[in-house]
Image (cartoon, rainbow, N blue to C red):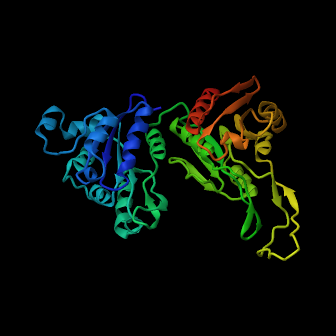
Amino acid sequence: MLAGKRILLIIGGGIAAFKSLELIRRLREQGATVTPVLTRAAEEFVTPLSASALAAEKVYRDLFDLTDEAEMGHIELSRAADLIVVAPATADLMARMAGGLANDLATTLLLATDKPVLIAPAMNVRMWEHPATQRNLATLLGDGIAIIGPNEGDMACGEYGPGRMAEPDEIVGAVSGALAQGPLAGRHVLVTSGPTHEPIDPVRYIANRSSGAQGTAIARALAARGAHVTFVTGPADVPPPAGVDVIRVATAAEMLEAVQQALPADCAVFAAAVADWRVSTASASKIKKKKGALPVLEFAENPDILAHVAGMKRGRPALVVGFAAETDDVAANATAKRLRKGCDWIVANDVSPETGIMGGDENAVTLITPDGSDDWPRMSKDQVANRLAGLIAEALG
């Protein structure tokens, strides 16, 4: 997706710098050329040799390097790239960027560039929440700097909260989005993802094993092709991708409402694992355990979001794609589901426990269309997403 693109990667000095090495590898897998720039602090966490070996490019470190200045110069280097990525963007780097300082190679490049800049902040939660950092962030956003993350989670320092650098795959998606002038530019695509949680009482609910990874990958791949993506997600295990409009829901009823509010769309991809049933007699108070007495739960059928949208008389998306998680007779059951729901395509997969697909990193799907079925080989969920996004772009012309 990034074939021929030139990325200038500035690596800041933080423990998250180790992720930048994987980021280099992922960017090159997508066809990008990566030129690393290390700050002095970054060299305390990763070596110039490791960055150079992974990038297969020279690493730049010093502002006052006579050889580099004679060969290219910081002005040329700052403008030769299609995009500058700062990962990790430490609190110090963000402060110097916001202040317009140019006291090392990294900040001089950032001040001299005329190309778009994407930052991936990473720092302690207290540093991230400090008013000074938030002021600097507001300044950078006002200057047109794009941002990915930070994520919430455990810190190297032992604290928990926002401040973790976005994962390499997320940053790659944000890079693609920042550079996207793709085949889906100007198109609106709706994607649902994740499980739904149907309450039994205030502390218990019915759910399923969906992680939301496949739906997230699809939204990311569509955004990378230039689409405006509305991402309606249940309580998923994975964070939503960058560059999309995120709507968070919990129940099937909430998801239906969010989908209706998001329409019209050129395409709708229903990757969410929506619960078929809900407890019609959900308790407003916690159900107490009583010895020898089991609670009686009455169920009601949840709305069929896929069938509802596929059957719309007015405002129906030009392409409606459903998903079918099956454990037996995958192609036959998915084909019947496509006809029953009235959608255009069904992406079917075998989620039997032995496949490891539900909640795993890989998928093996069969695409069901009016023309028949097409079995895809087992591949990563990102690869499945990219292949599906390509087909959607072709279908929408």
Residue 281, horizontal then vertical, whole percent: 85, 67
Who is closer to the viewer here, 199 or 351? Answer: 351
Residue 351 found in image quarter: top right
Residue extending farthest to the top is 371
- Name the residue furthest left: 66
- Residue in the foreground of this view, choosing between 320 and 371: 371
**Quick one: 249 or 281, which is closer to the camera?**
281
Is 252 displayed left or right of 81 in the figure?
A: right
Residue 190 place in picture, x, y as percent? 64, 44
Q: Which of 157 and 28 is in front in this view?
A: 157
Q: Can residue 117 be seen in this view?
A: no
Write the residue at 37% across / 66% down: 127
Residue 76: x, y in percent? 22, 36
Q: Where is residue 216 in the image (x, y as percent from the top left)?
A: 59, 45
Q: Is residue 273 above or below residue 181?
A: below
Q: Name the residue located 81 percent from the left edge and 35 percent from the top edge.
A: 333
Residue 169 visible in this rendered orientation of the protein:
yes
Residue 292 position (above or below residue 342) = below
Q: Quadrant of the C terminus?
A: top right
- Up-down relation of residue 75 to residue 133 (above or below): above
Q: Relative to residue 382, is residue 44 drawn left or right?
A: left
Badge count: 0
Q: Report the side of 43 relative to 354 (left or right).
A: left
